[in-house]
Image (cartoon, helix red, strand yellow):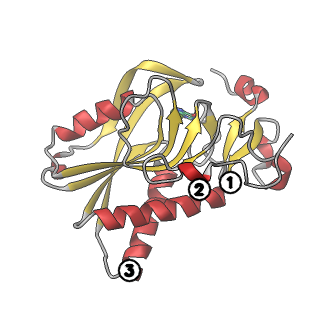
Amino acid sequence: RFPVCTGSAASMDNMGMKRGIVIKDDWPGYSLDLFTYPEHYHEDIESVYIPHGVIMNRIERLARYILDDFTENIMVLCVLKGGYKFCADLVEFIKVQGRNSNKYLETRVEFIRLKSYVNDQSTQELHIIGSRDLSFLCGKSVLIVEAMVDTGKTMKALLKHVETFQPKMVKVAGLLVKRVPTMTESLTDYVGFEIPNRFVVGYALDYNEYFRDLNHICVISSTGKLKYKI
Ligand code: HPA
Ligand code: MG
């Protein structure tokens, strides 16, 4: 059932900056036996969809793209809660590569909290449920860091909100972008992975607040969905 190498995971010809690493619809993920993960989730996940190491390698590459594009200090806007790991790792790679290439750009991180999902379904309303005054974004180069972009509705609303503070430039980094039929124009400048329209957890992405402590991005099992349903 499970492939034993990465050969069919991503299509090479579609790799690129705009779509990121494209994961095909028929990619089942890796067998759980091939990796380690928290014991308490052993019934709750079906497969390892993107291993933690691959996530890290891809983020390192995104950091390089970002360093090449930005010319001044970066105001990072981390979208909580799902974006906290991606943001921490991305900023770290931006710093390390900045030091290694003599283009050290200062990063300042601010947080914004949104919520739109209950169980594995998107709700209609977007709630900005935690944000400090963002007026310091005025005239600055802003990088929005979001773990998951699916319909793009949330990102569109957030971009509109950020624009009201009149930043000089706004770019969006999205670790995962879902291939959904309703997806309009791409709002994401730096895409980690383009994935099929399915629900994934781990690396800070949750299902009703569970699975954030899983390092790999995984596919949740039906047992897991039931167990943590609200
Ligand atoms: N996983 C977790 N949170 C999400 C997802 C997902 O696939 N899509 C939107 N929010
Ligand atoms: Mg969530």
User: What residue does disc 1 label?
Assistant: 51
Q: Looking at the picture, how far across and down is residue 100, in whole percent?
A: 41, 81
Task: Say whether mark 2 is within 8 Å of ligand 1.
Answer: no
* Position of residue 67 measured from the top left corner of the image (x, y, whole percent): 34, 67
**Circle 1: element type:** loop
Percent x, y of residue 192: 50, 51
Residue kind at label 2, given as amino acid type = Ile
Mark 3 residue CB less than 8 A from any atom of ligand 1:
no
Q: Amino acid at mark 1?
A: Pro
Dot 1: within a 10 Å radius of its alpha carbon, few (fewer than 14), some, or many (20 or more) residues?
A: some
Identify the amino acid type marked 3.
Arg
In whole angstroms, how far apart are the C-alphas of marks 2 and 3?
Answer: 22 Å
Residue 55 - label: 2
User: Is disc 1 in contact with disc 2, using a CB cutoff of under 8 Å?
Assistant: yes
Q: Residue at x 64, y 39 (%)?
A: 24
Residue in the foreground of this view, choosing between 23 and 107:
23
Residue position marked by numbered label 3 in the rendering: 99
- In the shown orientation, is residue 17 left or right of residue 224? left
Could you tell me how far apart the alpha carbons at marks 1 and 3 are, in whole angstroms? 27 Å
Extreme residue in the front direction: 13
C-alpha gap between disc 1 and disc 2: 6 Å
Q: Earlier in the sequence, mark 2 or mark 3?
A: 2
- Residue drawn at (62%, 30%) of the image: 198
